[in-house]
Amino acid sequence: MTPFPSEQYRECLGNVLKRPFAITLRSRLQCHVIRDAAKDEVETGEPILVLNEVTIDRGMSSYLTYLECYCDSSFVTCVQGDGLIISTTSGSTAYSLAAGGSMVHPQVPGILFTPICPHSLSFRPLILPEYVTLRVQVPFNSRGQAWASFDGKGRIQLGPGDALICSVSPWPLPTACLVDSTTDFLRSIHEGLHWNLRKSQALDGPG
């Protein structure tokens, strides 16, 4: 979905170095894993930074994931299905989109909360404000483990009582624009995803 064609990288890089250009500030997620055995202590001192999405899935288990989700101190829901995607708005055109989430302009502040194949007809995706903290926990009565991955890498197993904490990082990632943020976004969903591409209806009746 990058606006710069790879075969023209020399020209594009030269243009960026020679003249002013617009940037898109892309929000990132910072994530911590908390182990039940550690008594609410964070497993790693440094947060895991994510540009697109955090995915929590059932891995090789034949059982549905069972995840308790909280937004700040408020209970959100229990996820029963193949898993959950917590995404930035930049990641809205990636895995979240494939799971039925909305496409969102990358400079809209927010966090996408998208279930993966939920075992419910009424479980719709949410878009939450950027200032909240999400906590996803594997309850003790879960029938199986869960697995978390960060931008498709670094898979971590989550057992009963373990939790994943996600919030928007205070350090966004600046990326260069080909034209500007909105033009690049619309071009990417038209050309990269063929958004709303269809044949025009034929004219009926006499000319």
Image (cartoon, rainbow, N blue to C red):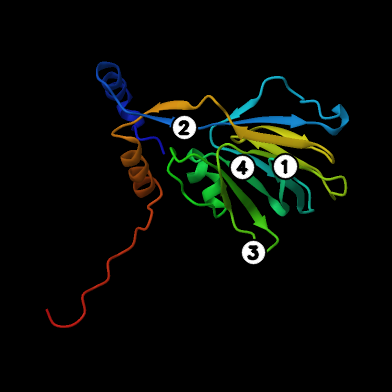
Residue 61 against residue 172 in the figure, above or below: below
Query: Separation of disc 1 and disc 4 at Cα?
Result: 17 Å
Residue 86, labelled with which disc? 4
The kind of residue tagged 2 is Arg
The residue that label 3 is drawn on is 122
- Residue 132: image location, x then y, percent: 62, 38
Question: Does residue 57 show up?
Answer: no
Residue 73, labelled with which disc? 1
- Residue 171: image location, x then y, percent: 53, 24
Residue occupying the far top of the picture:
18
Q: Earlier in the sequence, mark 4 or mark 3?
A: 4
Which of 171/49 is in front?
171
Question: How many labels sit on residues?
Answer: 4
Residue occupying the far left of the picture:
207
- Residue 103: image location, x then y, percent: 46, 49
Quarter of image, res 160 = top right
